[in-house]
Amino acid sequence: MGSERTIYLQMQPIEQALETVQQELRPATLLGHELVATEEAVGRVTAEAVYAQYSSPTFHGAAMDGIAVRAADTFAAREGAPVHLERNTGFVEVNTGNPLPDGMNAVIMVEHIDFVDSDTVAIEAPAFPWQHVRRIGEDIVATELLLPQNHTLTPYDTGALLSAGIWELAVWQQPVVEVIPTGDEVLDFRQRPEPRPGQVVESNSQVLAGLARQWGAEVRCQPPVADDESILLQAVQDALDGPAHVVVIGAGSSAGSKDFSRRVMEQCGRILVHGITAMPGKPSLLGVAANGKLLVGAPGYPVSAVVCYEQLLQPLLAQMQHKPVNRRPVIEVEINRKLPSKLGVDEFVRLAIGKVGDKWVGTPLARGAGMITTLTRAQGVARIPTESEGVEAGQTVRAELFVPAEEVERVLVAVGSHDNTLDLLANALQGLKHPIGLASSHVGSMGGLTALQNGSVHIAGAHLYDPESGDYNFPFLQRYLADIPVTAVNLAIRHQGLIVPRGNPKGIQGIQDLTRDDVRFINRQRGAGTRILLDDHLHRAGLSAREVNGYGHEEFTHMAVAVNVLSGAADCGMGIYAAAKALDLDFVPLARERYDLLIPTAYLEDEKIRSVLDLLGKPEFQQEIESLGGYDTHLTGQVMQPGMGLGEG
Ligand SMILES: Nc1nc2c(c(=O)[nH]1)N[C@H]1C(S)=C(S)[C@@H](COP(=O)(O)OP(=O)(O)OC[C@H]3O[C@@H](n4cnc5c(N)ncnc54)[C@H](O)[C@@H]3O)O[C@H]1N2
Ligand code: MOO
């Protein structure tokens, strides 16, 4: 079986891959012209020049309300020496848009005339010829070029076309993209399925559908096809025989024993590209079918698929439609965390972006190609080029923005420890009259302090316990951030403890159970406040880290710890009650701790920060926190002072 696997071929740079396909593709033979009604043509591309049928206006018309006159009759008018004109012979009353009466060539605004009697006006200033007159063809002259070929039609164009008497026009046919998802484990979302282990809900086809529609294509999606070469071949051939110009096979693009995309494409035409020097997106496939249609094999991982769609398919669809690729705005952002990158591939790194002080700051999100939320949570993406081994914290990169810059200016950048109340906060901030986005990335409390040090965050969430003083956060601020004024505002006090499976089958009661041979622990990463808390508890119980089975196994969030317990990968881990509750696990309380938002004092007056503080002070919001379970809110929203501890005297 191994010998049947397709090991992929020469990886090519994205631009080279595109070039190869663009050379081979014959858009003009694939897609012809069609006539569409003008009122339905927005977004379509003109297939030939459009010339005006009518002039606009078609007559000389009054541009203002007032009177139409012969300019020459008014030349003698002066202030204090008015010219008098008589109704019908000397002037005609007109409204904006009325045709000018024969012989008249100027309009005087109603505000500038005095009626001496009902039929006589006095004018104290001369009118010049064609004053306040819209002349024939001022806007459009019949026969003139209205739009050239290969022009993407805008709503403005609809106005011009209709004004010029163009009721329908020739546009390029819209490319039709047919998507065939594959995989035995891939469930048709239309069935509202509940995935069991090993299964995933099919979603990539719908991501492509949304994107490709924005790019001007029509999209048809099939339900997932089983991992069976002959069934897939049949499905692709049927699609190639139908109206589709492009057939996309979803997943099965790499080297697995059930990855048939390549073999199927070879049976339908020629492979032009298999493998691009990009990450995610590496195993992308491109080819041309025997009948000239475009074949695409998109990788299965959602982000890999998006890279394949956006970097390869989008430009090819643009080429087929004779239009340029719509590029996103690009800005320079400062990376607030070291970003290693692999040599030899272009890496597409999703970034949470916000404006901190006067600089744009980007926090790299997780790299996993399977994580679609790295796209939903990102404000932009940076392409770290092939020749780069990465970017140091504080260096800048160019990032494409997913949303307009003004929207990104309304994003609060939070870096630090994770807490579920941040999700509540994010949601509440979006509900404000002037919504605020919260881009939070979870790197542990100490990571938040580092970000504060770099001046690259608005907020750092921290719950750093100092065993010596029994205080939170301030001892660490004094140690690491003495020269940056920071204000600590309490978010909540939360219950930390041991997350154990439902029913606590191993009867774990406290810290001493962690040294039992039959108990496998899952730890948090170095620098996490929870890790420091655990170390303190071990220390106080006279236990050493070496005695804890699994101390070296680290996760980065409370939820990740809880997932380990749920899946049975560990018997317990330290975390917050809310994480245990979210997954319906049991919880052995060990301690309560203070979770603060550390805010550079310089930003306290920032409107976004003020909104956060406002919200935290609201009883309804505190109630929401309490209802998560495992939180006290008696300090929520208050400015903390050194030595306050848990604020209980
Ligand atoms: N031995 C190697 N294995 C892999 C390599 C490699 O170089 N050597 N490359 C990896 C890379 S990089 C990628 S990307 C993936 C791409 O794999 P496939 O295109 O063959 O996709 P699958 O393995 O079938 O699926 C991957 C993943 O995506 C899920 N999936 C599939 N279709 C959908 C869909 N329509 N909607 C949502 N999710 C989908 C699927 O369940 C899998 O979890 O290969 C690596 N392997
Ligand atoms: O290059 Mo594959 O496309 O991550 O994950």
Image: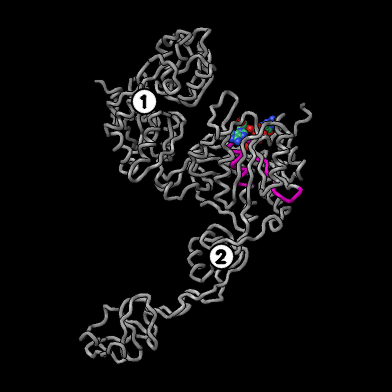
**On the picture, is 304 further left or further right than 542?**
right
Q: Nearer the viewer, residue 391 or 119?
A: 119
SS class, disc 1: loop
Q: Which residues are magenta?
A: 290-312
Question: Toward the viewer: 37 or 121?
Answer: 37
Q: Position of residue 234 (x, y in %)?
A: 72, 38
Q: Is residue 302 magenta?
A: yes
> Is residue 532 in view from this perspective?
no
Earlier-in-chain disc, 1 versus 2: 2
Give above or below for 491 relative to 335: above
Specify whether residue 481 is in view: yes
Q: Is residue 391 left or right of residue 345?
A: left
Residue 566 percent coordinates (x, y): 50, 19
Asked which quadrant contains residue 594, the reply is top left
Q: CA distance from mark 1 to mark 2?
A: 59 Å
Residue at label 2? 168
Above or below: residue 332 compared with residue 170: above
Assign the N terminus to one quadrant of the image.
top right
Q: Position of residue 434 (x, y in %)?
A: 34, 46
Q: Is residue 495 above or below residue 285?
A: above
How is colour applied across the structure in the image? one colour
- Disc 1 residue type? Leu
Number of numbered discs visible in the structure rendering:
2
For disc 1, the marked residue is 628
